[in-house]
Image (cartoon, rainbow, N blue to C red):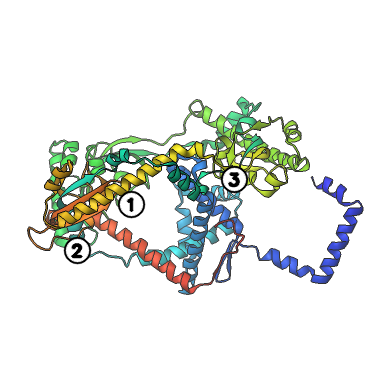
């Protein structure tokens, strides 16, 4: 590609261009060009620059976390890429603000603490101990030196110092817990009358004038957007894996190299009975809960069934229903005190009460899976897959460069690139700038297809990477400009919309009239009889009462309490579907805080503390940002 460029430049036109460049440098100076390049950044926080590469890495990490979280439900086409990049940028800015605040506050990380935290990372350990060679190898695979990684860790730990210290200041009082519980578990009694919008639809027949007026007023809604069909080449694992053979020797060699990594960790299976206890509980409460746990442990040692007692006593709802079973887990998975107890027990043993931040646990060790190096026969398919993946990765970057060069050197067609790499030129379905099937699901592909260079100039796109070892080059094959959708094509849609709007308006008008009659002294029952509708009564419903309309419950729990015993509060509300509700609230009953169980108290307290931690951190970031100079260039690849 570069040689072709040189050949073209060294003609007469090339010398003219070079002359103009020399004159430009003479007039304006080379320094201005270098300065412009040096100022490229994604954002600047108090003169500290966040580079585009940092933004790209943060975006990719966020995308990967989303993919891991969603699993098979992850659909690349449904991701708002620009929004995800904006979130990644905001996260980097917030992190830099906190880091600067921590550094300005004199917070530092000692070399001893840094080393301890790095040595504790499982990925850098062999057989439970830090391995320096493994450490350097894994960092090298990520393109990092130990010095770079250690600096990143030091900065991360510095920010943790500030955020963790701030989190420790959060607390919730017992009075707050009692008040919130009483409101959260509050019950309300009410009656309501629903006026369905559908009953009025038959009365509404939009005429041609109304239909045309709606069509004209909403012309933008009835426009068929510009769309294109694309010719494209796709370089991915399916193509790259052809003709890849893996020899028995290669499999054996890879297995020998990966033995340590393939070694499984010891797993233990345990059941527990949790007796919840606040971490700041007073001594008398601690003694009371400990005594209860010891009594249950004594019953188990006397022959009582552990699973039955777990269902009866455990404050952990997730495991109690399963007889306390927690399944298999490795060392370091549970909180330290629980972990230490489990991995010191013998199979079948039942522990004394073990205290953790959650309370007291009685633990039964039910099974042990020892660590082992699986035989080659068991992991052969996995080893072959990884060897192939590595070879595919090597081929991918070689062929991606060839694809990029050939598509650039032959901008008017894809066949030359297809022939060079043995690919097939395919054709997409119709794609708009916002959506499309097949390759149209990828926002990156749509952005490339509707770019000026591809759409207007008719050139091939650059390779667009849409996944791991997966790139697509496109060019426009057919183009259909945006045009108004004919009225006849959307007439039925308009009629349906006008009937819905008209019916909702009639339901609302009738509802407001009945609300006035309700205020004048009529009952809901009487109004229902007159309108041939049905009034419903609901007694002592909670905020999430099963079987009740969510909008109805939100309305009921938004109403003020009746002023006195026997009084009511009335309200009318139009629902999203066009129906209208008349609601009469008759009674409000706060929950008794004395009925709050230990498990409910613990769960509610944790939820409130976490909420306050998040609010506190958000407030800190907002304050720091208001005092900082944050610059985001207009051309940053995020909105």
Tell me which label, 1 or 2, sits earlier in the chain: 2
Query: CB of mark 3 within 8 Å of CB of mark 1?
Result: no
Q: In which quarter of the image is the N terminus?
A: top right
Is any atom of residue 410 visible in this view? yes
Instruction: State the mark number for residue 444.
Output: 3
How far apart are the two marked residues, 2 and 3, measured between alpha carbons?
Answer: 52 Å
Q: Which of marks 2 and 3 is nearer the N terminus?
A: 2
Disc tally is: 3
Q: Which mark is nearer the camera, 3 or 1?
A: 3
Dot 2: element: helix
Q: In this view, does 604 lie above or below 309?
A: below
Left or right relative to 157: residue 3: right
Q: In which quarter of the image is the C terminus?
A: bottom right
Q: Is residue 596 visible?
A: no
Q: How crowded is mark 1: few (under 14 residues within 10 Å), some or many (20 or more)?
A: few
Q: What element carries label 3?
A: helix
Q: Residues within 10 Å of mark 3 (few under 14, many from 20)?
A: some
Q: In percent of the image, x 48 and y 39: which residue is there?
A: 490
Q: Which residue is labeled 1 in the image?
A: 336
Indicate the quadrant where residue 271 lies: top left
Residue 12 in percent (x, y) is at 92, 53
Q: How far apart are the alpha carbons under marks 3 and 1?
A: 45 Å
Can you tell which mark lies on residue 174? 2
Left or right: 515, with 266 as reference point: left
- Location of residue 441 in the rendering, given as x and y in whole percent from the top left corner: 54, 39
Circles 2 and 3: CB atoms closer than 8 Å = no
Residue 380 coordinates in the image, percent (x, y): 53, 27
Q: Is residue 257 left or right of residue 22?
A: left
- Bin the neighbour count of mark 2 within 10 Å (Cα to Cα): few under 14, some 14-19, many 20 and up: few
């Amino acid at each position: 590609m570069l040689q072709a460029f040189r050949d073209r430049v060294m003609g007469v036109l090339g010398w003219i261009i070079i002359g103009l460049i020399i004159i430009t440098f003479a007039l304006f100076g080379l320094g201005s060009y270098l300065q412009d390049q040096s100022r490229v950044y994604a954002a600047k926080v108090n003169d500290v620059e966040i580079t585009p590469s940092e933004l790209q890495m943060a975006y990719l990490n966020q995308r990967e976390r989303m993919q891991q979280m969603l699993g098979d439900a992850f659909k690349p086409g449904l991701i708002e890429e620009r929004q995800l990049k904006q979130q990644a940028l905001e996260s980097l800015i917030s992190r830099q603000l906190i880091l600067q605040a921590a550094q300005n506050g004199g917070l530092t990380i000692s070399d001893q603490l840094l080393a301890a935290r790095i040595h504790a990372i499982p990925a850098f350990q062999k057989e439970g101990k830090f391995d320096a060679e493994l450490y350097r190898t894994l960092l090298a695979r990520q393109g990092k030196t130990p010095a770079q990684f250690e600096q990143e860790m030091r900065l991360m730990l510095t920010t943790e110092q500030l955020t963790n210290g701030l989190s420790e200041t959060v607390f919730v009082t017992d009075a707050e817990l009692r008040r919130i519980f009483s409101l959260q578990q509050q019950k309300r009694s009410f009656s309501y009358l629903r006026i369905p919008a559908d009953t009025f639809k038959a009365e509404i027949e939009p005429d041609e004038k109304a239909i045309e007026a709606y069509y004209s007023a909403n012309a933008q809604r009835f426009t068929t957007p510009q769309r294109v069909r694309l010719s494209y080449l796709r370089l991915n694992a399916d193509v790259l894996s052809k003709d890849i053979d893996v020899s028995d020797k290669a499999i054996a060699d890879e297995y020998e190299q990966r033995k340590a990594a393939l070694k499984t960790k010891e797993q233990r299976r345990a059941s527990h009975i949790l007796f919840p206890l606040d971490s700041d509980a007073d001594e008398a409460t601690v003694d009371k809960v400990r005594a209860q746990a010891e009594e249950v442990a004594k019953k188990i040692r006397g022959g009582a069934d552990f699973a039955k007692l777990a269902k009866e006593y455990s404050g952990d709802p997730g495991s109690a229903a399963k007889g306390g079973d927690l399944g298999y887990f490795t060392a370091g998975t549970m909180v330290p005190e629980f972990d230490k107890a489990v991995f010191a027990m013998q199979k079948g043993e039942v522990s004394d009460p073990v205290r953790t931040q959650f309370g007291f646990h009685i633990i039964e060790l039910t099974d042990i899976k020892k660590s082992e190096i699986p035989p080659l026969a068991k992991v052969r398919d996995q080893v072959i897959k990884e060897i192939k993946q590595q070879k595919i990765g090597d081929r991918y970057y070689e062929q991606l460069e060839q694809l990029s060069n050939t598509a650039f050197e032959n901008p008017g067609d894809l066949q030359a690139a297809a022939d060079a790499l043995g690919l097939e030129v395919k054709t997409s379905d119709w794609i708009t700038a916002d959506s499309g099937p097949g390759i149209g699901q990828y926002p990156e592909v749509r952005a490339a297809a509707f770019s000026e260079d591809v759409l207007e100039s008719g050139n091939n796109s650059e390779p667009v990477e849409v996944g791991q070892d997966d790139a697509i080059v496109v060019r426009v094959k057919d183009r259909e400009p945006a045009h108004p959708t004919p009225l006849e094509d959307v007439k039925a849609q308009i009629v349906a919309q006008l009937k819905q709007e008209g019916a909702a308006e009639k339901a609302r008008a009738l509802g407001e009239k009945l609300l006035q009659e309700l205020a004048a002294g009529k009952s809901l029952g009487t109004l229902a009889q007159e309108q041939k509708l049905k009034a419903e009564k609901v007694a002592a419903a909670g905020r999430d009462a099963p079987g009740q309309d969510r909008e109805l419950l939100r309305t009921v729990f938004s109403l003020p309490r009746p002023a006195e015993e026997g009084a009511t509060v009335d309200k009318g509300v139009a629902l999203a579907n066009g129906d209208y509700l008349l609601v009469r609230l008759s009674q409000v009953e706060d929950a008794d805080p004395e009925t709050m169980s230990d498990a409910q108290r613990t769960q509610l307290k944790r939820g409130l503390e976490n909420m306050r931690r998040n609010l506190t951190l958000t407030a800190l970031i907002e304050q720091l940002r208001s005092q900082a100079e944050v610059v985001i260039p207009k051309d940053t690849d995020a909105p």
